[in-house]
Amino acid sequence: METDLRLESSLWVGNKRYRAVLTGWHFNWTEVDKKKTISVPVAEVIGVEEGRVEILPHKSVEDKDKDFTVFYVKRSSNGGSSGLVWKVGRTQFSCPSRVLRDQWTKQLRTAVKLHSPLRPQRLLVFINPFGGKKKGRKIFHSVVAPLFELAGISCHVIVTERANQARDHLLKKDLTGFDGVVCVGGDGMFSEVLHGLIGRTQQEAGLCENDPTVTLQPCPLHIGIIPAGSTDCVCYATVGVIDPVTSALHIIIGDSQPLDVCSVHHTSVLVRYSVSLVGYGFYGDVLAESEKHRWMGPLRYDYSGAMVYLSNRSYAGIVQYLPADPLLSSPRDKTRCLSGCSVCSRSTERLFPHSSDSGSLYSANFSQFNSDSEGEWVRVEGRFRCVSLTCMSSSCPRSPLGLSPSAHLADGTGDLILVWDTHPLGFLKFLHRHTSTQDQFDLPFVEVHRVKAIRFCLPAGKEEDAYEEIEEQSSGTDEERGYIETVSRSGSQQRLAEGRTGRDLTNKQKTANPFLCGLCCSKPPPVSVWNCDGEILPFTEILCRIHGQLVRLYARGIENSTAAHDCSEEGDKCERRCILHK
């Protein structure tokens, strides 16, 4: 197949004449008698249209038989974000003849197909109309859909009407012909799509998700995220900005970012999957408290955080973890997982040594996750302010570096953060450092370990207290949701446990509020709850395992601001996909 397309001619942009050149990898145009050159990677051309065309905010077409318009990715830095904002660049060219115009449009379209083989052609789109500020439908139809149409992507759109509708659709319906699944919403909608795709993939592979030692099959369909929720942590941690246009453009050009997933089990039953945070103690208490104040909107998290901090709680627990290879990477090595991360690239070769495509079956990477590895587990016991496990940095606008700044998206490991019981001012210093560039791990009561799996259980004598505590908390939660999500023997998620109605509670149990006791109650709650990506788990004792590169997102990781560089290379050897304007 010919890979060195070349077309060169004079073109006009407005009243200025340019020398335009299409090579194997780039489309360049240079103003005549000047050195100003604009270079666009062919892989980042969004679309080519005849005539003078405008797409956003409204589509307009001026039919000119000698003109054509090129749309492409244009970057800009955003001081308030860790990544780069992608915008739609547009340049209108005029040709001396219609024949030359047709030649340019044909060659450009051919080059785009040749150098962007992973671009999606058909997508399944789920829109959450209730998430965030309830602007999901408007964001998709006014901003995203016109860009998809420009790029020649067809969509089957489903506006969800109930919780877990997207998950159930992915588990049961025919997905033939789709290249990927796009969720328009927040982290909750992403979680639904994540559970649906993983569950569907394991069903078709005949694997049991309940078994924590089983090697799960990576999902063949990519996931795209259009941020439109109250929390968009996954989008921020994988792209670096919360911007619908940026996310849509990553989907259009077919970017592919592998992502580790953590499976959470209780007594050999899968409870949930997580990609950002599994937290016990402070983070669990904040979530449980915030559920009682949903009427406050996003402000409920600030209020709940303050209340939980003032309650000054710590919890007894036993943590066991399976350490990752310290020679590969460390949570204290000061590196960041950015676009083109070398640690994640080496992990791909380690996870899939016999295939260049991570979509194939796993190697025996986790073969050590069995009884033979029992001696490798490390055990610690004590009282903790919080116990956290994250598969990514979990960065967000308020915490630009996240819970673990050096965590990686796709290295097959997670970072376990243990915050031991300490005085309130010390814990406040730990929390405050999340909002700055200071090292939150450089404190005597904080430990961080890179792990492949963890177990958490309660000390002897605490199990009964834990059962009663979780029963009280689950009663209200289950009545609202109607069920507890678990997994059936077939591996697909089902509505297994109905809400526990009719439970006999004493008047004291009914009126007591364990997460508002804080300053006014003499006895704090004996146990906390687990916060799993914004959902309260109905169990205290859990086992978590990291599955390397289980899913793929339409993303490329966070681009450093230096990625918005200039390119003066005229040849075809420059294959960088991050080139802008000079």
Image (cartoon, rainbow, N blue to C red):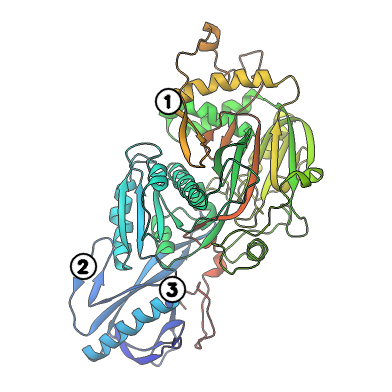
**x then y, percent, for residue 47:** 33, 72
Which mark's residue is nearer the viewer, 2 or 1?
A: 1
**x then y, percent, for residue 188:** 45, 41
For the point 31% across and 58% down, which residue is it? 155
**x then y, percent, for residue 469:** 60, 20
Q: Residues within 10 Å of mark 2 (few under 14, many from 20)?
A: few
Residue that mark 2 sits on: 60
Q: Are marks 2 and 1 in contact (CB under 8 Å)?
A: no
Residue that mark 1 sits on: 480
For the point 59% across and 17% down, which residue is it? 517
Of the pair 539 and 380, the residue shown nearer to us: 539
Report how many numbered discs are placed on residues in the image: 3
Amino acid type, residue under disc 2 in the picture:
Ser
Residue that mark 3 sits on: 116
Tell me the CA gap for discs 2 and 1. Answer: 47 Å
Residue 370 vs residue 560: left or right? right
Q: Picture quarter containing residue 50? A: bottom left
**Extreme-right residue of the structure:** 375
Of the pair 323 and 78, the residue shown nearer to us: 323
Of the pair 340 and 268, the residue shown nearer to us: 268
Task: Tell me the element at label 2.
Answer: strand
Which mark's residue is nearer the viewer, 2 or 3?
A: 3
